[in-house]
Amino acid sequence: LFIVVVIAGCSITIDSIDQPDSVNGGDTFNTTLHVTISTQQSADNRKFMVALLVPKMWNTAKNATVTFTSDITTGVQKMTVIPAGTAAPQGSGRDWPTLITDVIGNGGNLLPGWEWVAFYSDAAYSVGGNVNFGVTVNISIKVSQDNVSFKLGYVVANNSDGLSDPQYYASAFPGCFRVFGSGDLTDFCNPQLSTTDPLN
């Protein structure tokens, strides 16, 4: 029984996502995650982590704003990009993008040119045991002018447990998202995977 309590110390779920089907190139893409976190043990000094699977062409690390509100905090809580190369918890030295790619994958995007970008809450939080609380994550990204179809993805976790056990994190892939931009369509969802060159 003691072992069960330790293993079930915390769980996290993404309950729903408010995401549009498309935006125009150069516009701001806004999406909202509704998350529930449940604890059975108290936890001290935990930072909240949110990661986004996005096209590299968006330069999300510079063009995104991620904030959240929750039942246990007051006001809007800010989040900051985790610098590439920063070791993720329980990740055997891997950073968050590498760890998420190894554990969760690329969401079914069939072309290269995707990336995971991770954010930590600026503040750390302490939570008591046997607490259920909601978190609402608000994400805004200024997208590029590129004409693209892409399968977006989301991961939420914390800076202590990482991805060490499926109950400590949650992931979601709401489907193909379209940016109506300029130029030929770059289709990560259903790309043309082969070509024929008559000269070869």
Image (spheres, grey):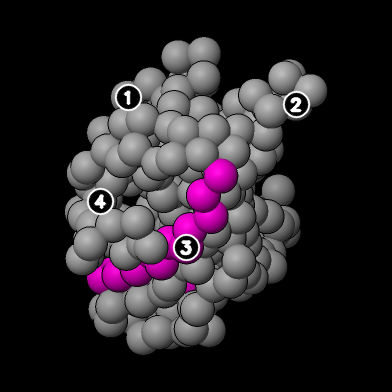
Q: Nearer the viewer, residue 26 or 125?
A: 125
Magenta span includes 135:
yes
Label 2 sits on a secondary structure element that is helix
Q: CA distance from mark 3 to mark 1?
A: 28 Å
The residue to which callout 2 is attached is 4
The answer to whether one can see residue 131 in this image is yes
Q: Position of residue 60 (x, y in %)?
A: 30, 56
Q: Alpha-carbon neighbours of circle 2 within 10 Å: few (<14), some, or many (≥20)?
A: few
Label 4 sits on a secondary structure element that is strand
Residue plotted at (44% across, 27% down):
160
Up-down relation of residue 30 to residue 69 (above or below): below
Residue plotted at (43% across, 72% down):
32
Q: Position of residue 176 (x, y in %)?
A: 61, 72
Magenta span includes 16:
no
> Magenta: predominant secondary structure element?
strand
Q: Alpha-carbon neighbours of circle 4 within 10 Å: few (<14), some, or many (≥20)?
A: many
The residue to which callout 1 is attached is 86
Q: Is residue 55 left or right of residue 45?
A: right
Q: CA distance from mark 1 to mark 4?
A: 16 Å
Label 1 sits on a secondary structure element that is loop
Mark 4 or mark 3, whichever is nearer to me: 3
Amino acid found under the numbered disc labelled 4: Met
The answer to whether one can see residue 102 in this image is no
Amino acid found under the numbered disc labelled 2: Val
The residue to which callout 4 is attached is 79
